Image (cartoon, rainbow, N blue to C red):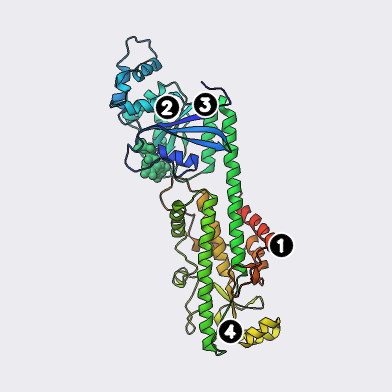
Amino acid sequence: MSDSSSPLRIAVVGHANTGKTSLLQTLLRRRDFGVVSPTGGTTRSVTSGEILDEEEVLAVILDTPGLEDSINLRTTIESSRTDRREDPRTLLDRFLASPAARDSNELAMEASSLEAALGADVLLYAIDARDEPQPRHLDELAILAMTARPLIPLLNFIARPEANTDAWREACARQGLHATVSFDAIVFDDAGEKRLLDAVRTLAPARENAINAWRSLRDSERSDAIAGANEIAADFLIDAAAAIIVTEPTSREAADREKAFETATKTLLDALRAHESRAMHRIAGVFGFSGREADAALLEITDAMGGVDFADTASLERAGLWAAGAGTGLVAAGAIVDLAVGGISLGGFTALGAIGAAIGAIGGSGPKILRRLRGQDEVRIGQTGLALLELRQHATIDAFLKRGHAAIEPAKIGGTITEAFKARSDGEPEKLLAEARGHPNWSRLSIPGGWQGGSNARASLTLRITTSLGCRFED
Ligand SMILES: Nc1nc2c(ncn2[C@@H]2O[C@H](COP(=O)(O)OP(=O)(O)OP(=O)(O)O)[C@@H](O)[C@H]2O)c(=O)[nH]1
Ligand SMILES: [Mg+2]
């Protein structure tokens, strides 16, 4: 076979519909690889994908059609035996050279899978762990043993409650296969991928360099992705914390000021929602989910967020984070939005009455005094709202970290946002975000604008928040 500097070759083999193509999508981090479908017999020919580091091919992974009729296949191969001392590989070679293995024949597809297996350093035998081990599986294992290639039984679908993990371990052990690996193609688990590569390394020691390079490529991609995603989150959170919307009342009358407060609140929340969605798309991109796939993933993540939409008062009310006020219509129970005067929070609109006293106490710059004379107020996201946004950013990153590229079901985050919110304690990121308060020109969302994103102070705060958000993902 090839020399030790050539790429590692892995063939994924197994029964039809056991998640072979899904496994390739996840290992390659490519949702666009092959076609995955819940009905068997989807992959009809051998295809391959590469693990690339810059220009260098570290590994080639082969996807193969499932072995559909293994009982017939084994009988055909073994029936060619003429001498009891012939070893299984001789029988397999004879079968592959026979007309039965050619193009139009009923076993031609199986033959192409076996040809691919013969050229591989290691075989991964994909198992749908929800199945009971059946005679057809044992026939498959016996046929694959004829290739004389090292084989790792890989238990897929292990995240499902009906998985028969123990029965499969026992069945594999009876075939002399003692080192099974569990790896779910859908619920991505970095430690699981590491265990898989460790098993491959044990069986293909000559390919150690390629395997180590593959692993360190994935390690650095993962930490780059976490850092990149946290920076996007930090930048978004500073925009949110620093944003101030100045109200535009038609008069200084309390009723007009309240109406203007409601309008400004809606403007702020809508802008935050749109801005959050942009941040989520960018985070999806950092984790290699792009185009339509990112959209699908985002919908699922939104779904998984305990249904709490911070910009929808009805949703906040259901979660107990907002209460509709008796007279005003908008009283932020947990101060999702704040009335801000001179950078000091006065809570929701009910605090408007306190404004006169506050103005006296705080004083203010020329433009601020002018605004107050016109009856203008400032609205910004409250501490509660900000904490909610921070949790949502964290949940988004966490969901993408655990999402295999073959995932089809909604991303699940541990516990709903509401539960996480109630259990939270103010941490470092919250303290740091307080520094963005009182700097409306640090936010792209402030009205009137005056965005000064390039300031050094904002950049340094972004960096510190990125780091403190990152600490939460350290294992
Ligand atoms: N829940 C869950 N579903 C999975 C997993 N792996 C694959 N699937 C689903 O199982 C079905 C079959 O997956 P494929 O990847 O097409 O299986 P395959 O072995 O390539 O199938 P053939 O090409 O037909 O032999 C698809 O609907 C997948 O979404 C898994 O780990 N967990
Ligand atoms: Mg397939």
Measure how far apart labels 4 and 1 are at the Cα level: 35 Å
Label 2 sits on a secondary structure element that is: helix
Task: Indicate left or right for 46 with 242 as reference.
Answer: left
Mark 1 / mark 3, whichever is N-terminal = 3
Tell me if I can see residue 425 in this picture: no
Tell me which amino acid carries mark 1.
Asn
Q: Label 2, on which residue?
A: 116
Note whether 247 is above or below 474 in the view shown: below
Determine the residue positioned at 32% across, 10% down. Answer: 82
Mark 2 / mark 4, whichever is N-terminal = 2
Q: Label 3, on which residue?
A: 203
Tell me if I can see residue 191 in this picture: yes
Percent of width and height locating residue 393: 55, 59
Residue 239 sits in quarter: bottom right
Locate ligand 1 by image quadrant.
Answer: top left
Tell me which amino acid carries mark 2.
Ala
451 or 77, which is in the foreground? 451
Mark 2 vs mark 4, foreground winner is 2
Q: Label 4, on which residue?
A: 352
Percent of width and height locating residue 173: 43, 27
Note whether 257 is above or below 83 in the view shown: below
Mark 2 vs mark 3, foreground winner is 2
Crowdedness near tag 4: few (<14), some (14–19) or many (≥20) residues, C-alpha within 10 Å: some
Q: Is mark 2 within 8 Å of ligand 2?
A: no
**Badges 2 and 4: C-beta atoms under 8 Å apart?**
no
Crowdedness near tag 1: few (<14), some (14–19) or many (≥20) residues, C-alpha within 10 Å: few
Crowdedness near tag 3: few (<14), some (14–19) or many (≥20) residues, C-alpha within 10 Å: some
Measure how far apart labels 2 and 4 are at the Cα level: 74 Å
Residue 456 is tagged as: 1
Tell me which amino acid carries mark 4.
Leu
Mark 2 / mark 3, whichever is N-terminal = 2
